[in-house]
Image: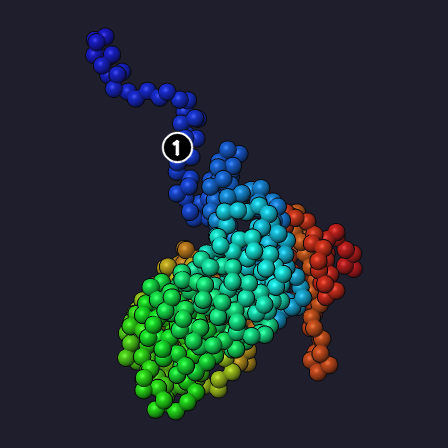
Amino acid sequence: MDIQQQEEDSKVPRFETEPSELTDTVFNCVVPYIHDCRDRSSVSLVCRKWCELDGATRKHVTVAMCYSTTPSRLRRRFPLLESLTVKGKPRAAMFELIPEDWGGHVTPWVREIVASLNCLKSIHFRRMIVRDSDIEMLTRARGPELRVLKLDLCSGFSTDGLLQIGKLCNNLKTLYLQESLIVEKDGEWLHELALRNTAMESLNFYMTDLVKFDYKDLELIAKNCGGSLVSVKISECDVTDLVDFFRYAVKLEEFGGAVFCVPLDNYDGLKFPPFLRSMALNYMSEIELPFVLPFASQITKLDLLYALLDTDTHCLLFQKCPNLEVLDARDVIGDRGLQVLGQYCKKLCRIKIERGDDEEGFVSQRGLIDLAQGCLELECLHVNLTDVTNEALECVGTHLKKLYDFRMILLDKEESITELPLDNGVRALLSGCRRLERACGVIKRVSEFAEAGNERGMARPFWNMELISSERHVDVKPQPPSLLAYYSLAGQRTDFPESVLPLHPPLDLH
């Protein structure tokens, strides 16, 4: 019996280290392979040891509000970052609810990057104020190491800053400038980029005022980077100027920005790259549609926000796009357009329908129901509606089980909403869409606070609260100020303009 017991005991594994030490060893090996930011955050809350381990191995961080922390605090917490995203103005700035001079300067972040974050290869600034001096400081210190640089919806800089990028960032793979307000002096920046860069994968200056560039520089980029270049989105130019560019960009998968300006006979030599999957052709009308239809079956992404198509032409195009996954469009597509999408575009994952000035085609609950019943793969749905019912919201909750981002804006085109309240529909939506992370509904207008004391009641520890005065015009009825609140570990900021009134320390609002 003793011999048998000894043999059984010998089969039990013995550890040379304590269980706690073994756990630390395992997690030292496992944590670097955890990439989801939410999982990372959960791990960091377990204990101080795991928090330090997360900080030492985290490769990417997004700072959703630039005033929520300080650059030095970020550097101490995550010293080995390889990728950083910093966002400035809130999204309300896109609807002119935040003044242009509200804040969001990149200068303190650039200084910290230059001084301490030596591993950084990818930088993304969104809705921030960027100066040419910031770009020069960044490129001189980090230019050769940078692989990704995104100045997204930013302002305050010129082509002088872009020239520094072209000269010093020779290994850049992604340059993203979409919808930034850039002062254009010349097109020399693109020429320098074309001469020095051979690794470019994505070049984007879509919806900017950069028009003084030479098309030969685009061709040179396509020649030098033809094996890697997969995405190019540019400012407005005629498609005929890009015939040679398309010939060299053989692996191009995404293109946007060009327009059809001359008679169709001039486009006889036009041939789009064979692997094109994503398109955004501005001011495209029904006349130019035959250039797109031959390869419509391979298109997975369409941006039709600036297309000049009516409802019928939208429907015709959708019928030819069975592999469509992402769509940006205006509400001119109408309920009929959503019905066609539900019938033909079964792979649709993301759709954003923005409000347009078109006389034709509005989207209502009928179109929303058809879309929800037909496109079961939808994950992101942003829609402007003229009317909505509980049935429509219940339909979304019943069919769109993968939906995680839902934004509905109810427009004031109708005198009254068909069915109120929407409690049952919202309840069905929330219970049916279990993956929902973002949900926003706006009905005509946001109600004002009933009492001034409500602002004080909203105050919480670590909150910064600001009253932002609206811009008043002589011919426009004055609007009440906006209230902006956000968490911050950095305390109250000091760079707010006169149009912003800080509510910390608490002010007497009575």
Q: Is residue 422 visible?
A: no
Q: Secondary structure at mark 1?
A: helix
Q: Position of residue 423 (x, y in %)?
A: 49, 64
Q: Position of residue 97 (x, y in %)?
A: 63, 69
| Residue that protrudes farthest toward the front in the picture | 195
Residue 254 percent location from the top left of the image: 38, 69
Q: Is residue 402 above or below residue 302?
A: above
The foreground one among 293 and 436 is: 293
Q: Is residue 485 above or below residue 73?
A: below
Q: Is residue 92 left or right of residue 298?
A: right
Return the residue at label 1. Answer: 26
Nearest the viewer among 328 and 112 is 112
- Residue drawn 72% across and 63% down? 497
Name which residue type carries label 1: Val
In the picture, which quadrant includes the N terminus? top left
Residue 313 figure quarter: bottom left
Q: Position of residue 335 (x, y in %)?
A: 40, 79
Task: Name the residue: 58% across, 60% down.
Answer: 135
Count of numbered circles on the image: 1
Query: Does residue 416 appear left or right of residue 11 in this picture?
Result: right
Please name the residue shown 39% across and 78% down the image: 242
CA neighbours of label 1 inside 10 A, class few (<14), some (14 to 19), many (20+)? few
Which residue is at 44% across, 77% downward? 215
Residue toward you, 400 or 93: 93
Name the quarter where the C terminus is drawn.
Answer: bottom right
- Colour convention of the picture: rainbow
